[in-house]
Amino acid sequence: MIRRQKKDMLRCVAVLMVTAVVFWAADVRAGELQQKLAAESAIEQVMQRGVLRVGLDVFVPWAMKDKKGELIGFEIDIARQLAKDMGVKIEFVPTKWSGIIPSLIAGKFDLIIGGMTITAERNLKINFTDPYYFTGQGVLAHKKMTSGWQLDDFNKPEVTIAARLGATAALAAKERFPKATLRLFDDEPAAVQEVKNGRAHAMVAGQPLPVHSAAANPEILAAYPDQLLEEPICMGVRKGDIDTLNFLNNWIAAERNKSWIDKRRHYWFETTEWQQLVQ
């Protein structure tokens, strides 16, 4: 009887030892996996490289060239301050809007800081940070072609609406004016020119472009005060990069608490002091 009890006890000890080894091995694998994920995160690679590569498209006043050919704008300020706080250099990678998400996924830059709003379609491909700003979509119209019109008057088959390809402005235009003809352009200056030339009745774009364009061409263009929708502006990162998301979210929270982002937004969106710097 005693011999049998000893055998059972030894068997239990053996089971416990095997279980302990299994858990230890699992912990080791989890630790290795965690280290591997951290090493592959964009933020770790930026620190090792010493350069933050930012993808963006060029549109006023988010990102544009000054008279010296240097990029300036709201998003440029955001990216430069982020790089400064990280202690690394900054490299901008201008990319057409329609290809900016595939370029991020392909690793051509580390993150998107380009006035990007969250949509379900985009979020299925990349991750977004917390919002650092909210913007609205507005209407810029040809003054003579739309004299006396209310917003509902744009929702007719004979009306042409312009918008930037791949932007949420196109979605807002399609939703608000489903009966109108929607024409898409690779960039916003081309869409504005289409309205100025009278080949489109209006365009839909994120503020402050409609207001600024109307102010610059008051005899030809008019901006409507209505906002079609309000959208959160976020940074875009590759999927599964938790370390980078954590760092960026904390950075955004800190800068918003200091009101630094609001001050830069006021300068670029609510003043025209910067226009003398632009080409």
Image (spheres, rainbow, N blue to C red):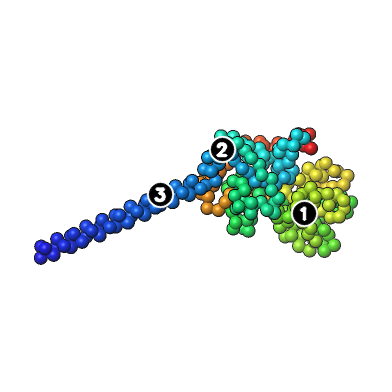
Amino acid type at circle 1 is: Phe
Mark earlier in primary sequence (2, 1): 2
Amino acid type at circle 2 is: Gly
Q: Nearer the viewer, residue 94 or 64?
A: 94
Front of the two marks 2 and 3: 2
Cα separation, mark 2 vs mark 1, equals: 36 Å
Amino acid type at circle 3 is: Gly
Residue assigned mark 2: 50
Res 82 label: none
- Residue 198: percent from left, percent from top: 87, 53
- Residue 201: percent from left, percent from top: 84, 55
Residue displayed at 67% across by 39% down = 76
Picture quarter with the C terminus: top right
- Tell me the crowding category of disc 1: few under 14, some 14 to 19, or many 20 or more residues within 10 angstroms, Cα based: some
Is there any visible trace of residue 174 in the rendered image? yes
- Tell me the crowding category of disc 3: few under 14, some 14 to 19, or many 20 or more residues within 10 angstroms, Cα based: few
Image check: 164 left or right of 28? right
Give residue 6's quadrant in the image.
bottom left
